[in-house]
Image: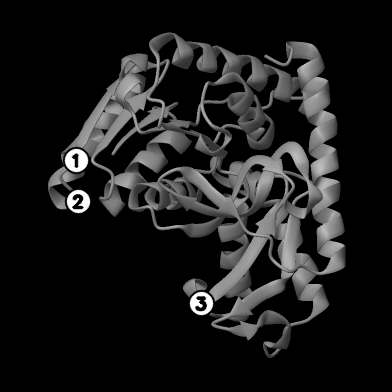
Amino acid sequence: MKVSIIGGGGLVGSCAAFALQCSGIVREIALLDVNADLAGGQALDLLHGSPSTADQIISSGSYEHIADSDVICITAGLRRKPDESRLDLINRNVDLFLTILDSIKKVGYKKDATVFVVSNPVDILTYLASTRLDLPTNRVIGLGTQLDTIRFRALIAEHCKLPPTQVKALILGEHGDSMVPIWSSASVNGLPLEKFPGWNPNAANELFTRTKGSGAEVIKKKGGAGFAVGIAIRDVIDAIALDSHQILPISSIQNGCYDIRDVALSVPTVVGKNGVESTYQLDLWPKEIQALRRSGTVLRETLTTVLNRVGRS
């Protein structure tokens, strides 16, 4: 399997490439970036480590790599300027993203390729990619709340002094302010989290609040998130490459799951070689379902604003 990472010279793209190299599952990794030297340097750095990781083809370049790629991962994006509004940042990133989609369409792509959107606002951009590329809806996915979910699990594990791999918990909905913590299915090695010794509602609220602010916390301390998002990207691409049918909280256009339609957001999704194999409607608490539907409404409002500006096709 060949994976091309658009924005591969940047922090997120290069960390994703490194995570994919360490897992050793995909056969080829290509780093594409407007800064060709930076992408070339990242690829060379990865290549130097290959004797101790996996036998992979690692390269850099431009959109010529897209034509034979199995997964096209888009990580390129712009950061918020001082005093810039959220909508202004969204508009700038939408404009950049549409130029990327135009370049993808110009060089052509495999009809069984999967386009994997990581750039933010990921749910809005996933919708745009799905409606502007000639691919089945299931083959256009977004990272969604997979990153939020692993952050959530890590913080719960830290609080409870547990191995992180034993903690199971989900964040669904928007990758943004209206994200929804799913406490109803949260567990520790099969034990409901609410029954874990010392667990209480105050801890739950504090941990979710910190999860929601984790991106800003990392940016404040080190300038930008890289390692965890790289791992989250690897989780999704490995599931595609292995056709593992893992259930992951990724973003795709919904067609009735939890009665949500015509908006991209994260629900429990079976991920395999075809991208979205199916969605899985977990039994949630009524308040969680209401919050998830409200998240869809919030995204629909933003999406309508964006579509009114850029058009629907």
Residue 32: x and y, percent? 37, 22
- First reached walking from the N terminus: tag 1 or tag 3: 1
Q: Amino acid at mark 1?
A: Gln
Label 3's element? Answer: helix
Is residue 302 visible to the viewer in this orientation of the structure? Answer: yes
Disc 1 target residue: 56
Residue 248: x and y, percent? 55, 56
- Cβ atoms under marks 2 and 3 closer than 8 Å: no
* Residue 89 drawn above or below residue 199: above
Which quadrant of the view contains residue 72?
Answer: top left
Disc 2 target residue: 53
Few, some or many C-alpha atoms within 10 Å of disc 2 (few <14, some 14-19, many ≥20)? some
Residue 284: x and y, percent? 76, 67
Q: Which mark is residue 166?
A: 3
- First reached walking from the N terminus: tag 2 or tag 3: 2
From mark 1 to mark 3, how far is it between C-alphas?
Answer: 31 Å
From mark 2 to mark 3, how far is it between C-alphas?
Answer: 26 Å
Q: Amino acid at mark 2?
A: Thr
Residue found 69% across the figure and 65% down from its top = 282
- Cβ atoms under marks 1 and 2 closer than 8 Å: yes
Residue 11: x and y, percent? 45, 35
- Relative to 63, 160 lies left or right: right
Few, some or many C-alpha atoms within 10 Å of disc 3 (few <14, some 14-19, many ≥20)? some
Label 2's element? Answer: loop
Residue found 44% across the figure and 53% down from its top = 235
